[in-house]
Image (cartoon, rainbow, N blue to C red):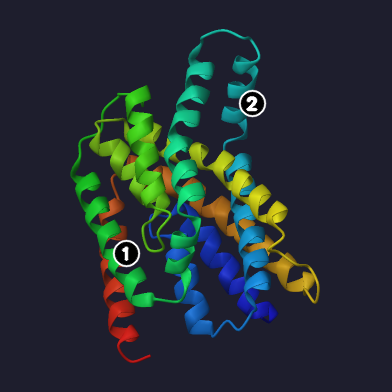
Amino acid sequence: MDYLDAIILGAIQGFTEFLPVSSSGHLELGKAILGDTSVPEESLLFTVILHFATALSTIVVFRKDIIEIVSGLFKFQWNEETQFITKIVLSMIPAVVIGLLFEKELESFFGGSIAFVGAMLIVTAVLLWFADLAKNTGKPVTFKDSIIIGVAQAIAMLPGISRSGATISTSVLLGNDKSKAARFSFLMVVPLIFGKIAKDLLSGDITTQSTNFGTLSVGFIAAFICGLIACTWMISLVKKSKLRYFSIYCVIVGIIAIVTSLYL
């Protein structure tokens, strides 16, 4: 992988982690288009670095919210911040369970099957279209909602299903306020990303031998900067009910991926 490829893949990860178009699906498509010949360990390390960059960009964008939540948590009271953390923990359970029990099965979907990615992008498009039609409310995310949203996040572990698209759409369709849905969606994934990074690092499946740290660095920077832009932009788009444009985009890319797979 050269520097240009690293920048392109980093930008793809940074933008698509927050925009509802599936970061994992676009990374798979990007690797297929660029002809990524990295060995699995190197490819996994690069993916981990990109996910760390987007998690860091989330923390930067929501730094005030995170400081407020942590401060409220250490008051050791059943306050709004403690309840929010509890909802985050509940939302993580489905993804953790599915990730641990079906890790090998999930990995099999990341083998370059762009037809599958295309089909899942179309599923994402349908979710976004219906969510965009929903009326905005002032309703916050409830404990029951957090579990259902967590199930949507677990399903979004499939490449092509947008995590942000699935979780925000599910939350909005449950009647939650759109801005609150976006905030919950972006914050709920941070612990999972760091948990997955820790698991990958401790698994021994990642090696740094023969690793080009230059490409890792530019990929990280590209993902971080694009993540900052996309996260801020997405919050504004959700409030303004602009999800249908991403729905159309996902349909177009999904169809192109399916048609392209027939000729590869």
Q: How would you rate the neighbour count of disc 1 (Cα within 10 Å): few for under 14, some for 14-19, many for 20 or more? A: many
Outermost residue to the bottom: 263
Of pointers 1 and 2, the one earlier in the residue sequence: 2
Residue 72 x %, y % = 60, 15
Label disc, if present, on residue 121 of the rendered structure: 1
- Compared with residue 115, is residue 64 higher up or lower down, i.e. above or below? above
Q: Would you identify the image quadrant in which residue 114 lies?
A: bottom left
Q: Residue at x 52, y 77 (%)?
A: 31
Q: Name the quarter where the N terminus is drawn.
A: bottom right
Residue 175 x %, y % = 24, 31
* Residue closest to the eye, 22 or 207: 207
Instruction: Confirm whether residue 142 shows in the render.
Output: no
Report how far apart the C-alphas of labels 1 and 2 lie in the structure.
35 Å
Q: Residue at x 34, y 48 (%)?
A: 166
Q: Residue at x 67, y 59 (%)?
A: 49
Inspect the image, locate mark 1, and give the three-letter code of the amino acid beneath it: Leu
Q: At numbered mark 1, what does the secondary structure look like: helix, strand or loop?
A: helix
Residue at the disc numbered 2: 67
Give the label, 1 or 2, closer to the camera: 1
- Compared with residue 40, is residue 16 higher up or lower down, i.e. above or below? above
Inspect the image, locate mark 2, and give the three-letter code of the amino acid beneath it: Ile
- Compared with residue 247, is residue 116 higher up or lower down, i.e. above or below? below
Residue 116 x %, y % = 33, 71
